[in-house]
Image (cartoon, helix red, strand yellow):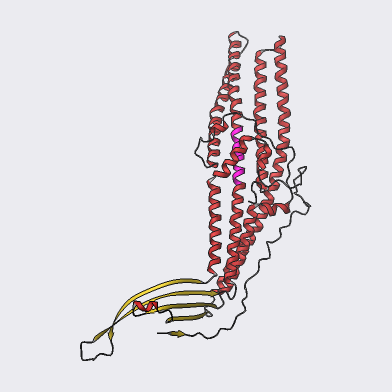
Amino acid sequence: MRTYILTPALLLLGACTVGPDYAGPPVVAPAPDAGDGFVRAGDLSASQPALANWWEGLDDPVLNELEQLALSGSPDLATARARLDGARANLRLDRANGMPEVGAMGVAAHLRTPDLGSDPESDGGVSTTNIMNLGLSGSWEIDLFGGQRRQMEVARAKLDSAQASVADARVSLTSAVAQAYLQYRDRQQRLGLAETTVLRSQDYLELERQRFDHGVGTQTLVENAQKALEDARQQVAPLRAEADSFANALAILAGKAPGAVDAMLVEPSAIPLPPASVAVGDPATLLQRRPDIRVAERALAAETANVGVAEAARFPHLSFMGLLGIGGSNASDLTKLDDFTAIAAPMLQWNFLDFGRGKAQVGQAEAKRDEAEASYRGTVLNALGEVEDALSAYRSARENVASLARAEISTAKLEELERQRFDLGTGTKLRVIQAELAHMQAQQALTQGKVALTTQFVTLQKALGLGWSAD
């Protein structure tokens, strides 16, 4: 048996791609007086900063190790990478959807039907038929108006966005690790100073009691000394709890259980300070470097391509379906390769009367594109604002640390002078302890100022979009 269903010849249709072509993001101009640099950069270097591993400029081996632990074990970073893998798979799927589909099939059926040729007066007969068939089936939709090509543009843009999201996760992660580490070192140093302050306050209270017992002091001075001692004691427990909390945060950022990195932090260490020269670059490079801006730009590209997808859906769809098989009513027919069935059937489908549904869907896509464009502009402006804020805060923190350092030097000199007077017999132990306590307060303030300075440096690095690499 040989059966053919012949299809009429089809005219070749010139394929086109409907919808707007993506021409890049809108230009967001900097402030008129910014020139080629940032408005509040001041004396900071306009050279381009290093993209990755900015924390190495703080020259702290423990911080370097913690950053590497976090980059290799962070759950948040693993989540972003998994989404990237999903975007790659979606791109492969969209690419495959534009190709023909070919499948194999096999049929074995037994049909039992009434025999329509039997005598109406009789009880009627039945007819039985066996069908056995092996074959190939195929289908392919021709991308006449570029809907599939636009869908590929969407998938590529989403893949780029997922890659930028991984980079953005690295920026946030490395910044969070550095800030938690700085806060831990701050609490560690302040805890040591607080414990020393308690000891000196106890000495001060004891001297006031001795003076009162000898009739040269007052009960008021004793009570004031007691109050100062209790104030000093009240600082110890909260600082210890806060240090534990930041140690736990560092472990979690590294993808480990709380306490896992405690051994790395036990040895006290000085607060790491920023390098003498800090490069900040310029706004134009910032827009190319910050991953969140790239995410917003790729979202705009995807939504622009989606307008084309919606436009293409309004036009006719041309698809082909084919079937090639062998078989018959007996199993032996499956070996007759010269007796086959072939079907080739084109299908043209066009929902030309949809009462405005297609046009409405295009309008929805255009609105989403406009929303993505506005979001991109907002992202750029927020990024520029974050950098300018960070620059201003960093410069202010530098000035504050310089003032705190001068104040600490003065209190250290006053303490030394009181010790010299005491050694010469012209001073008192009480004045020495008072000078020591004042010096420790200045040291506490300087420690907090240093932490604030380096924290602002970290904030600036995050605002500049640093902490990731192209690979």
Residue 50 in percent (x, y) is at 70, 46
In this view of the protein, which residue sits in the foreground, 317 or 136? 136
Is 214 located above or below residue 62 in the figure?
above
In this view of the protein, which residue sits in the foreground, 4 or 141? 4
Residue 188 in percent (x, y) is at 59, 30
Residue 34 in percent (x, y) is at 77, 51
Q: Main secondary structure of the magenta part?
A: helix
Residue 457 in percent (x, y) is at 68, 41
Residue 398 falls in which quadrant of the image? top right
Is 438 located above or below residue 63 in the figure?
above
The residue at 54%/33% (across/down) is 262
Magenta segment range? 172-185
Residue 21 falls in which quadrant of the image? bottom right
Would you say residue 81 sits in the magenta stretch? Answer: no
Is 110 located above or below residue 413 in the figure?
below
The residue at 71%/23% (across/down) is 411
